[in-house]
Amino acid sequence: MEALEKNNEQIQFSYILLFDEKKEAIAFATIKLVDFYLDSVQNDLQSVIEWMRCMGRKLHLLSSQKTFKILTCGNTFVSGEHGIFIKPNQDKKEVVKQLAKAIVAFEKDISKEVIDAFMLKDFVNESLFITDALHNVGYNSFNVDPNMVLTLDSNWNTFDDYLAALKTKYRVKARKALKMSTGLQTEEITIESLKQLLPEMALLYKNVSNKASFNLGYFNIETYMCLKENLKDDYVIKVYWLGDKLVGFLSGMINQDTLDAHFVGIDYTVNRTYAIYQRMLYDYISLAIDNNIKTINFGRTASEIKSSVGAVPQDLTIYLRHRKSIPNRILSLFLNRIQPTEFRLIKPFKTKSIKN
């Protein structure tokens, strides 16, 4: 969090602590004030955004020049539950409700400008029996594109073991992609080489981020410096060269027995010819096997191709409320229409190939 806060000045970071009657800390939440640009939405949320724009102007809540300010609990750059920590043996439903109220009350302390909406993001299905208490304090819930998660077989000691677990069709596909990418040279970069490569990496990242249908904020690539300095070998950045030209990079964080795949950068002019993105997915898997990782969180973009390497969808729920009660009630009607992007779920493994 320190690395994100230090290098992303466009986002205002704050933190909330809840205390019990004994004045002992029982919960912690990370809060970010994000300037969300309505015109940046390019997916099914467009209908909701158009309504927000129209309603906001009619009620004098939102002008054409004004950005939509969202106070967000959760990591704006990573999918999953990264916003709230609750001390064990607490009434989690009550704590979540108190945190939601604290976030609203906190509005006046952190911003001189009016906040348009409050968001708590990316809760998995197992948490909904707790977080659905947010409905009682005015929040509306909706599903977003799932986090794609690969669970590794404990018997995979090498990447070849992974390939052997695939059905013939997908093993052939993998070997073809790996053959197409043989013209690439790869390198895990150090802090020293990272300094030199940041400008090129920023351009490659922009190629990918510009294709995203929904962004809550633009990630400053210089954040990688802090992440690498603080996490060392637990933060991996791998670059892909075509001759002397940088054509891609991947990044990821090793968190105990989990690998969180972070941002990638791709030169799309040569992506298909050299199967760069598909090679990256296989490299994440190889990295996970080498580090005895149990699960890879691939994030929620390119769901179909991620399912082709074995990842399965993990549903995510976002809670959102408008600061004004009447627009919030109308907002709920539109949020109910939002559905995750449909994709073809591929099952590439042989029957009963995963043993956990």
Image (tube, rainbow, N blue to C red):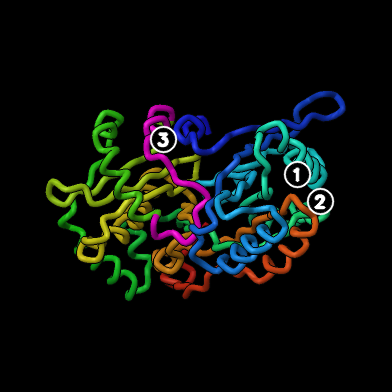
Q: Which of 125 and 31 is in front in this view?
A: 31
Q: Is mark 2 on a helix, strand or loop?
A: helix
Q: Which residue is drawn at 45% across and 73% down?
A: 346
Q: Residue at x 62, y 33 (%)?
A: 14
Lower position in the chain sequence, tag 1 or tag 3: 1
Residue 146 at x, y percent in the picture? 55, 61
Q: Is mark 3 on a helix, strand or loop?
A: helix
Judge whether 30 appears above or below 146 on screen: above
Mark carried by residue 270: none
Q: Which residue is drawn at 80% across and 47% down?
A: 93
Distance, label 1 to label 3, CA atoms, is 29 Å
Lower position in the chain sequence, tag 1 or tag 2: 1
Residue 116 at x, y percent in the picture? 67, 49
Find disc 3 in the rendering and name its residue: 223
Mark 3: amino acid: Thr
> Are the residues flagged by discs 2 and 3 in contact, CB closer than 8 Å?
no
Q: Does the magenta stretch include residue 218?
A: yes
Find disc 1 in the rendering and name its residue: 100
Q: Nearer the viewer, residue 82 or 126?
A: 82
Q: Is residue 145 visible?
A: yes
Q: In this view, does 115 lie to the left or right of 208?
A: right
